[in-house]
Image (spheres, rainbow, N blue to C red):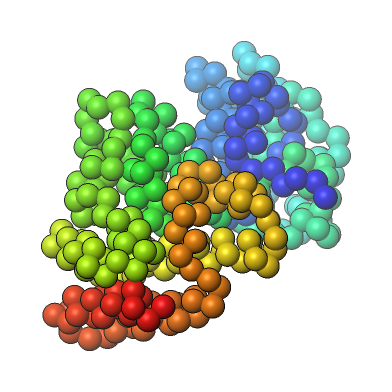
Amino acid sequence: MNKKLKYWDLKAELQKGIIHNNYFFNDEESFLKDKAFQKLKTALVPPKVMDFNFEMFFGEETKVNEVMEALQSPPLLSDKKLVILRNFQSMHITYKKKIVEYLEKPIPDAVFVIETDKVNTRTGMYAKIAKLAQTYYFYHPYNESEAIRFLREESAVLNKTIDNDAARIMVDYIGLNFQELHSELEKVALYSATKSNITPEDVQACIGISKGNTIYELQNALAQRNLGQSIKVLENLIANNMSPVLIVIMLTRFYTTLWDILIQRYQQNRTQSEIERSLGGWGSKSFMNSSEFYSLENFEQIFALLLEADKKLKSVDAKLNKTILEMMIYRLCKNV
């Protein structure tokens, strides 16, 4: 089975000067699609002739003859012309067939990009398009490692670097969403002003996360069943206004990672290096060390305690939040 190409592959090809006549952008990650469009424009169309050598159409409002005219008109003062057709899935079926016919015999000096929402490229018309065009899949970030990579690359665009811990905090706090990560990163970059490197302190101060990277201290204390230290760290988090629900969310991610490690180790018989690679490289040693304190049998109760705390936090008076979390911590240390 051929590898499904993604945004990062397109970026690498353009850096090498590799250009295709036909492109097909599939799936729902619109932020990266916009970045891909911009990179193609930068690579192909000089700014002075942008009005002559770049056209964008939208399938729901475009007739096929308009697209054909744009593709057939030669570029002006440039080697290539770029034509983008967005929302191809919304075009009339008759128009779609004409577009597919064009892909079979593309015009050499025209670069044509077809963009769709998520469609099935295994059968029918979209399978044919996928064969006739260089196809890229624009997924939402599917794991933390990919989101971290995105933050590093976007930091470089902003003339910054970002600490691993700072990037990890952002992903834990914001989640797997390129658009939201990018927006928050821009805020942090502005906050860090003349500094070249974004630190955990910059992230915490800018997006309202508690001072000190103490959520990870809480994870470590819980893994070792150190009740006194766990309660102390929890109080520090609460004193610095970390959301109680966020604490549960981040602990759930922590325990889910440990659970996955143990499944890979004992049910899939993977080696330590294979497991570490599956974790994305950064932070893997800490997770591996924490997993040593647990067995697979522990996790049914762990997830039940986390779910119970989450439900209570969302349904009772906020004055009880600290008590709910303390009881959860106590049971995670003493009963698991």
Q: Quadrant of residue 111?
A: top right
Question: In percent of the image, x 65 and y 36: which residue is there?
Answer: 9
Q: Nearer the viewer, residue 225 or 97?
A: 225
- Tell me the quarter of the picture where residue 133 sits: top right
The residue under the point 48% across, 48% down is 285
Q: Is residue 75 left or right of residue 286?
A: right
Answer whether residue 135 is visible to the viewer in this image: yes
Percent x, y for residue 172? 38, 56
Where residue 39 sits in the image (x, y, percent)?
Answer: 55, 30
Q: Is residue 146 visible?
A: no
Check the image and report above or below for 103 versus 310: above
Q: How many marks?
A: 0
The spot of residue 274 in percent (x, y) is 65, 49
**Is 185 placed above or below 159 here?**
below
Q: Residue at x 80, y 46 (%)?
A: 2
Task: Point out residue 250 in the picture as x, y percentages from the top left corner.
Answer: 37, 63
In the image, residue 15 sits, relative to residue 168, either above or below, namely above
Which image quarter holds the C terminus?
Answer: bottom left
Is 47 left or right of 268, judged from the image as shown?
A: left
